[in-house]
Image (cartoon, rainbow, N blue to C red):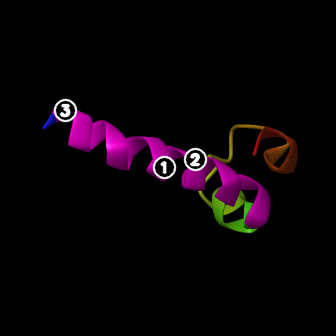
């Protein structure tokens, strides 16, 4: 079961990481207001 979970988690995390570059506005929208420079932090 752990091997299967890792098999799904690994690619899922890679896709999430790539989405930071492909769709930055989505991630900027969920940034808290108290953090400065949303674009740079995403």
Q: Disc 1 on helix, strand or loop? A: helix
From the viewer's perspective, tell me whether residue 5 is left or right of residue 24. left
Q: Is residue 21 above or below residue 4?
A: below
Kindly check if marks 3 and 2 are in contact, taking CB atoms under 8 A apart as contact.
no
Q: Is residue 35 above or below residue 8?
A: above
Rendering quarter of residue 36: top right
From the viewer's perspective, tell me whether residue 32 is left or right of residue 1. right
The quarter of the rendered structure image containing the N terminus is top left
What residue is disc 2 on? 14
Q: Position of residue 17 (x, y in %)?
A: 63, 47
Q: Which residue is painted at 78% across and 39% down in the image?
A: 41
Q: Which residue is painted at 76% across and 65% down in the image?
A: 22
Q: Disc 3 on helix, strand or loop? A: helix
Kindly check if marks 2 and 1 are in contact, taking CB atoms under 8 A apart as contact.
yes
Magenta-drawn segment: 2-22
User: Which marked residue is nearer to the observer: mark 3 or mark 2?
Assistant: 3
The residue closer to the viewer here, 37 or 33, is 37
Q: Which residue is painted at 68% across and 54% down in the image?
A: 18
Q: State the CA–CA distance, disc 3 to disc 2.
A: 18 Å
Q: Which residue is painted at 34% across and 44% down in the image?
A: 7
What residue is disc 1 on? 11
């Amino acid at each position: 079961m752990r091997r299967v979970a890792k098999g799904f988690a690994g690619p899922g995390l890679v896709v999430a990481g790539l989405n930071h570059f492909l769709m930055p506005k989505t991630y900027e929208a969920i940034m808290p207001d108290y953090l400065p420079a949303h674009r740079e932090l995403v």
